[in-house]
Amino acid sequence: MRRLLYLIPVAVLGVLAVFFIRGLGRDPRIIPSVLINKPVPQMNLAPLPGRGDTGLATADLKGRVHLVDIYGSWCVSCLVEHPTLLDIQKTGRVPIEGIDWRDEPVKGAEWLKRHGDPYDRVGMDPAPGYTAVNFGVTGAPESFLVDKQGIIRLKYIGPITPEVWEKVLLPKIRELEK
């Protein structure tokens, strides 16, 4: 009987090791979202200064597949993905909509002026950033593919790189355009 008592901690450790090993094999940039296959959260965001009268509203994300990018001037990883977003914009393949998250409006506008503006529309979501929270954002950058009906179909966490564009986003866009 005493020998069996020693097996219990070993068995528990074995079960924990299995969960740990499974977790290491997962991609941390792909986090399930409760919003996948659900409508885009209601929003009516004001535009950044100097970008005209058009901000970003829920209704803007219908009729065509859209890439919605959550960014901020304070976000180092957003600067990493920015050249790729500019390249995507040049292709005209998909409209890119921006949500300037937890930023002072002037800083967000200056950042785009300095680094280039890949966005068709940009809405301000200043601190505490309720719109991004409604999207389930945990950090920036995060991106969402929205279908023609305004339904979120994909969430991507982290910088969009050329490889992510080619292997993850573009195939999903093609699928959604059918």
Image (tube, rainbow, N blue to C red):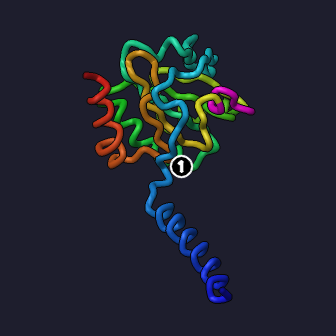
The answer to which image quadrant residue 154 occupies is top left
Give, as a single range, the part of the protein colored magenta: 128-133
45 horizontally vs 147: left or right: right
Residue 158 horizontal/vertical position (percent) = 50, 47
Residue at coordinates 43% horizontally, 25% vertically from top-left? 146
152 horizontally vs 102: left or right: left
> Is residue 54 or residue 63 the one in the foreground?
63
**The C terminus lies in quadrant:** top left
Q: Which residue is mark 1?
A: 77
For badge 1, the amino acid type reads Ser
Q: Residues within 10 Å of mark 1 (few under 14, many from 20)?
A: some
On whether residue 132 falls in the magenta region, the answer is: yes
Magenta: predominant secondary structure element? helix
Q: In this orientation, does residue 31 appear?
A: yes
Residue 10 horizontal/vertical position (percent) = 59, 80
Residue 49 horizontal/vertical position (percent) = 63, 21
Q: In this orientation, does residue 117 appear?
A: no
Residue at coordinates 54% horizontally, 23% vertically from top-left? 122
Q: Residue furthest right?
A: 128
> Is residue 122 or residue 11 the one in the foreground?
11
The answer to which image quadrant residue 52 occupies is top right
Residue 35 horizontal/vertical position (percent) = 53, 30
**The N terminus lies in quadrant:** bottom right
